[in-house]
Amino acid sequence: MTTVSIDELDGRLLELLAREPRIGVQEAARRLGVARGTAQARLEKLRTGGVIRGFGPEVDPAAIGFPVTAFATLEIKQGQGLEVREHLRGVPEVLELHTITGQGDMLCRLVARSNADLQRVIDRVVGFEGIVRAATAIVMENPVPLRMVPLVREAAGLRASDENRG
Amino acid sequence: MTTVSIDELDGRLLELLAREPRIGVQEAARRLGVARGTAQARLEKLRTGGVIRGFGPEVDPAAIGFPVTAFATLEIKQGQGLEVREHLRGVPEVLELHTITGQGDMLCRLVARSNADLQRVIDRVVGFEGIVRAATAIVMENPVPLRMVPLVREAAGLRASDENRG
DNA sequence: GAGCAGCTGTACAGATTGTCCAGTCGCAGC
DNA sequence: GCTGCGACTGGACAATCTGTACAGCTGCTC
């Protein structure tokens, strides 16, 4: 787990790219007030250092017909961990899966086409011997969508975030 | 909530971009076997249709010093929802927040610098009048990181996913 | 059979990317 | 105080990509 220390410039660069991914290195360097080579070097460092995993498209499940999100806590039968992982990996509606502390449990994020469809998804998820029980919580609202900027600012020593437009 | 219907080409395009975000429209068109204009038009459609939210950098919290992830279920005092949202929005370590079914609860994803540091984060999260109680589950493993490709394939009518390299 | 939407192939100007280089700056060590 | 080193600057170059446009072809609908 290589930890890369992020300085202020890295932080601002990440923040800038997070807000406006389309600008590219050239424009980013311009706005940061540094030479392009510098921005490019930083970006490269962040990428090779594992800080930036990639620039994959962020797909909105709701926009492609899966507007319902839910979290399911799964209770797993002892020793069935690997099989359950494999099973869940095969379910497209399982967007992510974590093993968590507690009695050998897992937490997964699900999506479905509707509340009714969620039943189908859950049935498919729990329809596997290794899973003893599932507790599902449907997401109603998402006041804070997945975000990284505040954390990056924290890591970069850039406190007092809030909207520093420019 | 505009739902865009995704056809096979859209699906393959999204999958391609998800796997290798750096290739650009030109190369993507090449690999999909279509004219660049077509790929460009599709991409534009997906973007304006809200399917693709953006191409922001995916930052790994662990790489910038926050290797511990946890999910906290919060029990909120009646009528304190808005205040609690605002409070949590101000905590950088809160990466996302959902309101979920159940007795007016919320679920949030947290990160911390260490298990010990997690205590600090939790204290900060629950150190707010509106929050009655918090149940925290620490993430040990992440067998399925947030993914979208299988769902996209499903939506595009491209079943039988699994590794169709090319 | 006409009309329309979508795709193809092509073209062009403008901008960006990946690289490389010499010069400068600030800092640590001798 | 001086040397060495890493990082940044400003500039340059070829190769590539992007945004955009246009004419022709195809398949499907009315």
Image (tube, coloured by chain):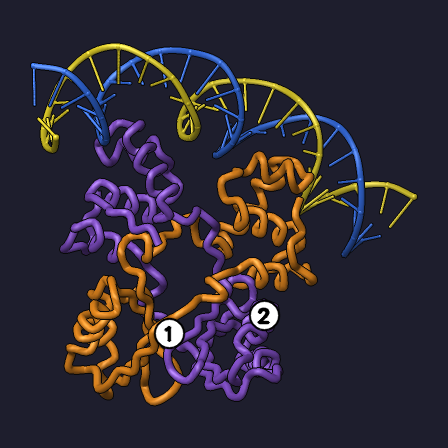
Chain colours: A orange, B purple, C blue, D yellow
Q: Residue at 61%, 79% (x, y): give it.
A: B124
The quarter holding residue B73 reads bottom left
The residue singled out by tag 2 in the image is B86
Callout 2 secondary element: helix
The quarter holding residue B64 reads bottom right
Amino acid type of the residue tagged 1 in the rendering: Glu
Q: Mark 1, mark 2: which one is toward the viewer?
A: 2
The reply to whether residue A105 is visible in this rendering is: yes
The reply to whether residue A86 is visible in this rendering is: no
- Residue B152, percent from left and from top: 26, 53
- Residue A29, percent from left and from top: 62, 38
- Along the viewing direction, whichever of B16 and B14 lies nearer the viewer: B14
In the image, residue B63 above or below residue B55: below
Is residue A76 shown left or right of residue B94? left
The residue singled out by tag 1 in the image is B141
- Along the viewing direction, whichever of B133 and D10 lies nearer the viewer: B133
- Quarter of the C terminus of chain A within the rendering: top right
The chain to which mark 1 is attached is B
Using the numbered discs, state the Cα–Cα distance from disc 1 to disc 2 in whole angstroms: 30 Å
In the image, residue B90 above or below residue D6: below
